[in-house]
Image: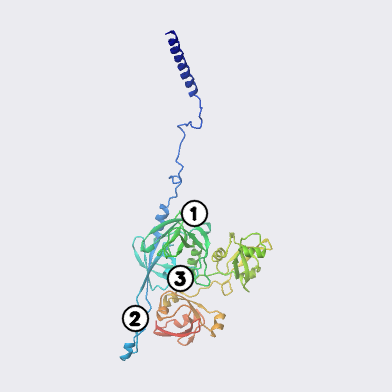
Amino acid sequence: MKTFAKGIITATLCGIISVGMYKAIEKKDVHPYTNFQTNTPVHFTNLNSPETATDFTRAAEISIQAVVHVKTKSEGESQYYYDPFMNMFGGNGYYKSQAQPRLGSGSGVIISEDGYIVTNNHVVDDADEIEVVLNDKRSYAAKIVGRDPSTDLALLKISESALSYIPFANSDDVKVGQWVLAVGNPFNLTSTVTAGIISAKGRNINILSDHNAVEAYLQTDAAVNPGNSGGALVNTSGELIGINSAIASNTGSYTGYSFAVPSNIAKKVVGDLMEYGQVQRAFIGISIRDIDANLAKDLKLDELKGVYVSGLTDGGAAKDAGIEEGDIITKVGAIEVDNVPELQEQVSKFRPGDNATVTIKRDGKEQVMNLTFKSLNGDTKVEKKETAAINSLLGASLEEITKQDKDDLGIKNGIKVVQLIGGKLRNAGIKEGFIITSIDRKPVSSVDDLMSILEDKKGGILIEGIYPNGMRAYYGFGL
């Protein structure tokens, strides 16, 4: 019993000592990495928290009100058929089918409160009637102020005021990776908004057939489909950075990438169309090419930056400024250019007679040249191609022919039909490119000659002329 009692006492004392030691140790930070102060603020680290998410709602609200649905109607062409049975029973065997109207649709962007709307040229090309439907379902007949196939842009006008519009942003400030919204009417689904990022800048996709085409598209992965053409590409502030124009697709529908005309190009084009009735295009007078690895190796270049000057035009702006074949253009003004589309984009912002600095590299050394841009004809004049009267009366843009045209076709005078925007010339069957040499047997050498002949003219007129392929043609219609 005495031995058992000693054991109980010993075990009890050991327990008391153990508990005391644990309590003493418990007060210390034995495991500081797991100790947690409950008064420290904590946050989830997911990237979609309200504090960091990009909000598109304001940009969508602004742009939806200013993006319109453009509906077009054009008269189809009649076709002639031969019926041998009709020929057997006294007819001439030929009969004419009834033309079926063609309907089309796209999008447009209101850029001023008094009803100017920018869209794509291919949306309204060949249209005889244009209807513009606003987001609030109001509908208006629109007229074409002007078109520019070189950039695939067109300017429309509706008679209304106090309209919502989208302000232009500076597309030079657009960064690859920034968020954007595409707004338009795909598949006639009005006021559709999609989001994406800028995937690339200065893309040339070889979609325009015009020999003076300017392609320096913004590439985005925002979903764009048929019907989006002419719609808005906006930044998260709701400012216009581009006009949606094309998609890269094997199916005809969106498969990953779309392309928009940069806002700086669009702003200059529509400004020219408003003020002059035509685009005042500046030319630098050079042949250029991108610098690739093979060219860099042949020229022993240390880097592949800039645009290589492979040729010069006599009397052109570049040659007059002292630029030489073999130079490498690296900047226009303060903007760096690293490929042909980027250089074309910067040059497209200028008019004949405008001055700019061009930075080049020659023999490894940088030089800054002062350059005055010229027109295609080699002068610095800004010209009005025709008055508003011709546009409204004939529905055409006209320009005087060059000496080369005269030599090639063996003619002494004429004015060329550059664009048809609906009107008497198109209805008479005249096609773009036709050169008017005389009206009512009177020679025509300038737009002023045309205006003089048509002034106070009533009744029928006879137009004579020639096409670029040498085919002569005659057309008649009434005024």
CB atoms at circles 2 and 1 under 8 Å apart?
no
Is 57 in front, or is 396?
57
Say which amino acid is labelled 3: Gly
State the colouring used for the structure image. rainbow
**Image quadrant where one finds the N terminus:** top left
Residue drawn at point x = 38 percent, y = 78 percent: 77
Which residue is situated farthest in the bottom direction here?
90
Q: Is residue 331 above or below residue 414?
A: above
Q: Which mark is residue 178?
A: 1
Q: Which residue is mark 2?
A: 97
Q: Is residue 28 above or below residue 439?
A: above
Q: Earlier in the sequence, mark 2 or mark 1?
A: 2
Instruction: Please indicate, yes or no, whether residue 101 appears anywhere in the rendered image.
Output: yes
Task: Tell me which corner region of the image, top left, top right, bottom left or bottom right, holds residue 139.
Answer: bottom left
Instruction: Please indicate, yes or no, whether residue 170 appears anywhere in the rendered image.
Output: no
Q: Earlier in the sequence, mark 1 or mark 3?
A: 3
Residue 150 image point, x, y percent: 50, 70
Q: Earlier in the sequence, mark 3 or mark 2?
A: 2
Q: Which mark is residue 146?
A: 3
Q: CA distance from mark 1 to mark 3?
A: 32 Å
Residue 225 image point, x, y percent: 41, 62
Say which amino acid is labelled 2: Ser
Secondary structure, mark 3, is: strand
Q: Bin the neighbour count of mark 3 within 10 Å (Cα to Cα): few under 14, some 14-19, many 20 and up.
A: many
